[in-house]
């Protein structure tokens, strides 16, 4: 199973459109916060029709309307501040903040821990867990990236959004 991870979209719907193409062949999507507006969640729901798991970021404003938008799509699951999932036998935690994600990874309770917030793409080992920060879709600091995690190999990578369609990725 291929899991895509993204974060820090900040309503950049143009970059999001390219990111959704980039992760289009994934089986599941985890969004680690800072979508911002309900129309961004609507775009994700329409552009990625498979299971989608979302946690809040510090810039997600109208949570009532975001919740209402999520409820319109059976494949979109809002988890609040923390998502705890098991996908294809992989124990996963997702949170927005890196400080909390590092502690979750160190707990030994998860195989994969994902986070956003700092806009810095990272794949690291934390005990027995893979710690994955997909970077940012927004592009505020220049590089637009997403994360990919293969549950069969337990390998993660950072993929450039702009490389959609390119064979530069180990998984793509």
Image (cartoon, rainbow, N blue to C red):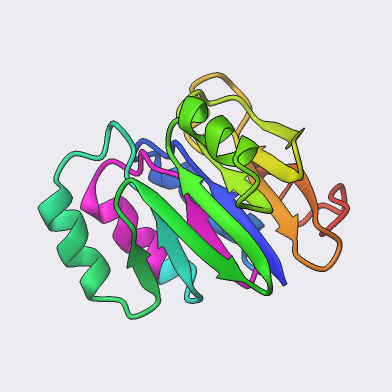
Q: Residue visible at 55% across and 19% down?
A: 141
**Relative to residue 130, is residue 42 drawn left or right?**
left
Determine if residue 19 is in view: no
Q: Quadrant for the C terminus, please.
A: bottom right
In this view, 1 is above or below 42: below
- Near-viewer residue (56 or 70): 56
Q: Residue visible at 26% across and 66% down?
A: 70
Does 87 lie within the magenta span? no
| Image label count | 0
Where residue 78 sits: x, y (%)?
Answer: 32, 61
Q: Residue visible at 72% across and 55% down?
A: 149
**Relative to residue 107, is residue 85 drawn left or right?**
left
Where residue 170 sits: x, y (%)?
Answer: 88, 53
In this view, 98 is above or below 1: above
**Magenta stretch?**
25-45
Determine if residue 138 is in view: yes
Does 32 lie within the magenta span? yes
Which image quadrant for residue 105?
A: top right
Where residue 112 sits: x, y (%)?
Answer: 65, 51
- Near-viewer residue (66 or 103): 103
- Near-viewer residue (127 or 93): 127
Q: Residue visible at 18% across and 39% down?
A: 61
Where residue 87 sits: x, y (%)?
Answer: 61, 71
Which image quadrant for residue 158?
A: top right
- Near-viewer residue (120 or 9): 120
Q: Quadrant for the N terminus, please.
A: bottom right
Residue at the far top in the pictured view:
141
**Relative to residue 107, is residue 169 drawn left or right?**
right
């Amino acid at each position: 199973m291929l899991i895509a991870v993204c974060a820090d979209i900040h309503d950049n719907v143009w970059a999001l459109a390219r990111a959704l193409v980039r992760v289009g062949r994934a089986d599941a999507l985890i969004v680690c916060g800072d979508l911002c507006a309900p129309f961004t969640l609507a775009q994700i729901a329409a552009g990625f029709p498979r299971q989608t798991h979302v946690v809040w970021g510090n810039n997600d404003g109208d949570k009532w309307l975001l919740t209402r938008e999520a409820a319109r799509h059976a494949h979109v699951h809002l988890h609040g501040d923390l998502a705890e999932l098991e996908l294809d036998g992989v124990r996963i935690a997702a949170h927005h903040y890196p400080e909390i994600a590092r502690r979750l990874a160190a707990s030994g309770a998860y195989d994969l821990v994902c986070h956003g917030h700092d806009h810095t793409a990272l794949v690291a080992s934390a005990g027995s867990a893979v710690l994955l920060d997909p970077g940012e879709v927004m592009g505020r600091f220049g590089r637009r990236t997403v994360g990919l995690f293969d549950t069969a190999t337990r390998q993660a990578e950072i993929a450039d959004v702009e490389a959609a369609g390119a064979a530069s990725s180990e998984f793509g």
